Image: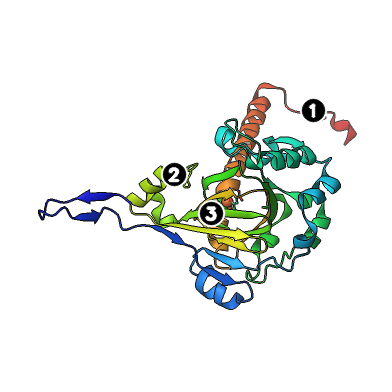
Amino acid sequence: MTFLKTTATHKARIIPLSNKNIIHLESINASDSIAFQKNYLMNEKPVIIKGMGKDWPAIRRWSATFFKNTYGHIKVPVCYYKTKQQERYRDQVKIPLKEYICLAEKNNHIDSNVELPYLGGWIYYEEFPELLDDIDMMLPCFPDNWLYKLPPSISIPPTNLIIGYKNVSSPLHTDSFFVNSVLTMIVGEKKARMVSPSHTFAVSNGQDLFNPEIAKQVLKQGADIFEGTISEGDAFYIPPGWWHNVINCGFTIAVQNLHVDTYRFPLFEQQIRGLVLPILTKIENLGREAREELFKAEKALPPPFISSDWRFY
Ligand SMILES: O=C(O)CCC(=O)C(=O)O
Ligand SMILES: [Fe+2]
């Protein structure tokens, strides 16, 4: 915290320049789904959901060894958030999962200056739908997921897998399309710092809120920073529009689930319109261009052949 010396009294009095501090995220038990919906989901307030995935088969089955032995040969997309920011999924570099996990295990405790790859969101179920049997996609705390109602042509993948290690992290960002994000820990521990959308004036994309200098600046501007740690079976609820910066405390495996409920769907619809309308406009313009060309061609060329030999009629 920064202090300011005042001259109001002769005794050097110290007044805090900012009364903001890092606030611990609240937590709630996953079995209290009604209280969760009332106090957190409806208020768009972040929270740690204790035991969210504790009964998922993934907790017993998934490990570095499991993924190396079962899917090691598969190439997975990796991110380089610091040097490449957010690349499109299909443009990401792909490396064999076994190679990635070996690097993750090796680099867990070493500091590196070169940016290392991060398996920051693998849409695993497209290739291996059987992995969905290991998690509970119904998410009891999150009723009626409208993402499942979307037509396949604009589907937003409702789940992805994140395998991390100490040297990689997700810098400060918000998730697209105002979705609820549920990040459930299967192996290891993650720490997050979050800032409310109402304090957006104090932060910017890509920041490292774990850097004490940056955190100090953000607090000084009057924003609150919320912090929490999740371990095996626990989840972060990250509400729509909330800024979050997530670091891995060691080797981790986590599942992210996206969720849009009835209340948030109209806002989500507007976001998707923003995505679809430019494509539609482009197609409309091309259609107009094609009609103009046809119109000109009709004037320049002889009219299409029409038999003038009336004897045949
Ligand atoms: O675990 C991470 O690195 C990022 C998680 C995240 O950004 C999310 O759940 O929305
Ligand atoms: Fe995120």
Counting the numbered discs, the total is: 3
Residue bearing the label numbered 1 = 305
- In front of the other: 178 or 93: 93
Q: Please give the name of the residue rendered at 73% of the width and 53% of the height, measured from the top-left corner.
A: 152
Task: Using the image, determine if residue 143 lies above or below residue 71.
Answer: below
Q: Please give the name of the residue rendered at 48% of the width and 47% of the height, measured from the top-left corner.
A: 210
Task: Using the image, determine if residue 110 lies above or below residue 196.
Answer: above
- In front of the other: 299 or 144: 144
**Dot 1 or dot 3, earlier in sequence:** 3
Kind of residue sitting beneath label 2: Ser
Q: Which of marks 1 and 3 is in front?
A: 3
**Dot 2 or dot 1, earlier in sequence:** 2
Q: Please give the name of the residue rendered at 65% of the width and 41% of the height, measured from the top-left corner.
A: 118
Q: Which of marks 2 and 1 is in front?
A: 2
Residue bearing the label numbered 2 = 204
Q: Please give the name of the residue rendered at 89% of the width and 33% of the height, measured from the top-left corner.
A: 312
